[in-house]
Amino acid sequence: MTDLAMSTARGQSRIGKVALRWLLYIALGLFALYYLMPLFVMITTSLKSLEEIRTGDLISLPREVTFDAWKTAWATACTGIQCEGVRPFFWNSVLIAVPAVMISTLIGALNGYVVAQWQFRGSNLFFAALLFGCFIPFQVVLLPMARVLGLMGVAGTIPGLIFVHVIYGLGFTTLFFRNYYVSIPSELTKAAKVDGAGFFRIFWSIFLPLSLPIIVVTVIWQFTQIWNDFLFGVSFSQAGTQPITVALNNIVNSTTGVKEYNVDMATAIIAALPTLLVYVVAGKYFIRGLTAGSVKG
Amino acid sequence: MAPILDIKNLYKNYGQVEILKDINVSIDSGDFLVLVGPSGCGKSTLLNCIAGLEPISGGSLHIDGQNMTDVSPKDRDIAMVFQSYALYPTMSVAKNITFGMKVRGVDAATQDSKLKQVAQQLQIEQLLSRRPGQLSGGQRQRVAMGRALVRDPKLFLFDEPLSNLDAKLRVEMRTEIKELHQRLGASMVYVTHDQIEAMTLATKIVVMKGGVIQQIGSPAEIYNRPANLFVADFMGNPAMNLIPAKAKANGEGTKIEITRKDGAPIILTDAKNRNLPEDVIIGVRPEDIAEPDFRASQDAQQAECRVDIVEPAGADTFVVMQMGGKQVTARLHAETSAKPGQMQRLAFDLGKVSYFAPDSGQRLN
Ligand SMILES: Nc1ncnc2c1ncn2[C@@H]1O[C@H](COP(=O)(O)OP(=O)(O)O)[C@@H](O)[C@H]1O
Ligand SMILES: [Mg+2]
């Protein structure tokens, strides 16, 4: 009797568990759909002709797939008076983002290594100041930064933009590396010192090889930030050095006459592709790097 | 010949806190110096100062006659084994061992032959291509030793190298380190909080407490003539019995009177030690209280004692009694006839006792 009661209870709870699981999946599926909807609309719209957009339904599939909008977006769309598509701006963004990511990551790694393993008088204060830098809103630094860039003679240039992004990213990159390196026992540094290694040798031979997960995290973070930046890009560039986010804005906002939704959508996707790619390639490490802290010795 | 390590009036502060106070130690070539003391007493700090990993706040430090006070670790000709082993996680065992030579620009052929020699010595040849993460605790320990041995330095420094091993392995490695020391004739400074490790390994022991040296001496000196109550209590297992007593000078020597909860006080006569103050603490090692016919000594004085607890421990049997308000342990032989609750005639070896002043804790005899 009790046995029977218990086994049915257990059976019920098992059914309950399965039902709950399915409910969870359905809920997650709905959320995913909800988030993917805009992307779906963007992709389908970019593959339609203007004619079809005007007459058709927003969420219907294209009757006739055409890549004309993509070609226009890439090579001939007008961003103001100039009509060369987003291609030059795309390369500007690459020229800004790649060096800025590399430099800010490398300096962040060195900073983090110093703050975590080579405590000096005032090193905590130094770190606190860097952290504070993370929380300063972009708008606050615009004017002083413009002045500094002017004084340095790099106003409106790509090196100037690289400089801005490196400076603004250092707080975050230092924080990432510092938090990763504090979990590495200081005896490791001591052992290397006794072995005769100096500051850079220890960094290069012992700390950097341990750092792959946190490098990936930092690169993804920095790349996303810099590639998607609009405010610095629009403030500190001039004709010829503008990044793709600025071009996107110009294409969408400056077309006269008929609004070419398909071209706008294609441009937006082109602008978003590199960050998407970085996530797909390195996302696995991103999660791992965020959760992994200590190093098993 | 100059001492291999000579520390004079060394002070170490962290900010306002004085961690090490007026440390004076020197050892000769081939000595095995053990720094022992409770956790947090500054042993690792002192070792780091010797290594040059921590700057010192005062005093001087010479290694083999050279002033090393302000010299960086890499130029001190030392090698160090750390408590956590501190193996480089991304390097193979071989790379771990040769890293120091590589940094110093030793040529590849020499590196290789030294690596082979050390690997063979420590029996880790089959591990050379592995990463530290793939090794057991004992194997990591050996690799850490290998990294130090390959350097062939003037001075070896060990910071609690065995404390992360299980009990059995710890005893094995202890013997191995001792054997290594005898074979190499190297000079070593070894930090531990384990007084048995200190006794078995050292040629010279430094007992520390709160950043102050309590006593320096050979293991026998430390064990037989502890300088104060702290050393007496810290060194030895079971600990030395420290019993409050009254001392009165009389014709034959000094009469030592120890009160008992039930019955008359124990009266012992110490023929050697005179001029003791009235209040003393008498320190007797458990093995210096024995059955009269078992460990006879000419200085032995006998008394009847009530046994409270009998603890057979294989080779010995420990009995616990009450004297002077303290639990007193005696180490008797395994087949003792002592029974709990019964009187037992015991001999106290007064030739080996220590006397301490109750207030200052300092040794009196
Ligand atoms: N970097 C440091 N800053 C401040 N105090 C420290 C530092 N390192 C150690 N101490 C203090 O110095 C004392 C001795 O530490 P340590 O030498 O590690 O002791 P032991 O090795 O004997 O256990 C401890 O009280 C510890 O808190
Ligand atoms: Mg320690």
Image (cartoon, coloured by chain):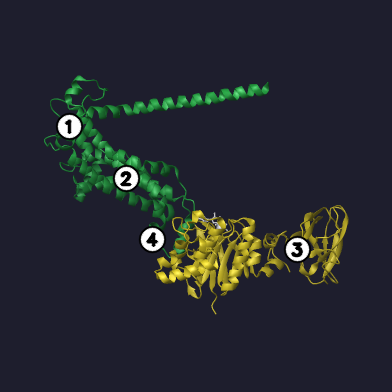
Q: Is residue B244 visible?
A: no
Q: Is residue A206 visible?
A: yes
| Chain A drawn colour | green
Question: Helix, strand, or loop for circle 4?
Answer: helix
Establish whether ligand 1 lies closer than 8 Å to the Cβ of label 3. no
Q: Percent position (x, y) of residue B46?
A: 54, 63
- Amino acid identity at mark 4: Arg
| Chain B drawn colour | yellow
| Neighbours of disc 2 within 10 Å: few (<14), some (14-19), many (20+) | many
Q: Percent position (x, y) of residue B347?
A: 84, 65
Q: Are marks 1 and 3 on the same chain?
A: no
Q: Which residue is mark 1?
A: A68
Q: Nearer the viewer, residue B21 or A119?
A: A119
Q: Chain of mark 4?
A: A
Label 1 or label 3, whichever lies nearer to me, is: 1
Question: Helix, strand, or loop for circle 2?
Answer: helix
The residue sitting at 85% across, 60% down in the picture is B266
- Amino acid identity at mark 3: Arg
Q: How many marks?
A: 4
The residue sitting at 84% across, 66% down in the picture is B294
- Amino acid identity at mark 1: Asp
Q: Chain of mark 2?
A: A
Q: Chain of mark 1?
A: A
Is there a contact, CB below 8 Å, between mark 1 and mark 3? no
Q: Which residue is mark 2?
A: A169
Q: Percent position (x, y) of residue B21?
A: 56, 63
| Neighbours of disc 3 within 10 Å: few (<14), some (14-19), many (20+) | many
Q: Which residue is mark 4?
A: A201
Is there a contact, CB below 8 Å, between mark 3 and mark 4? no
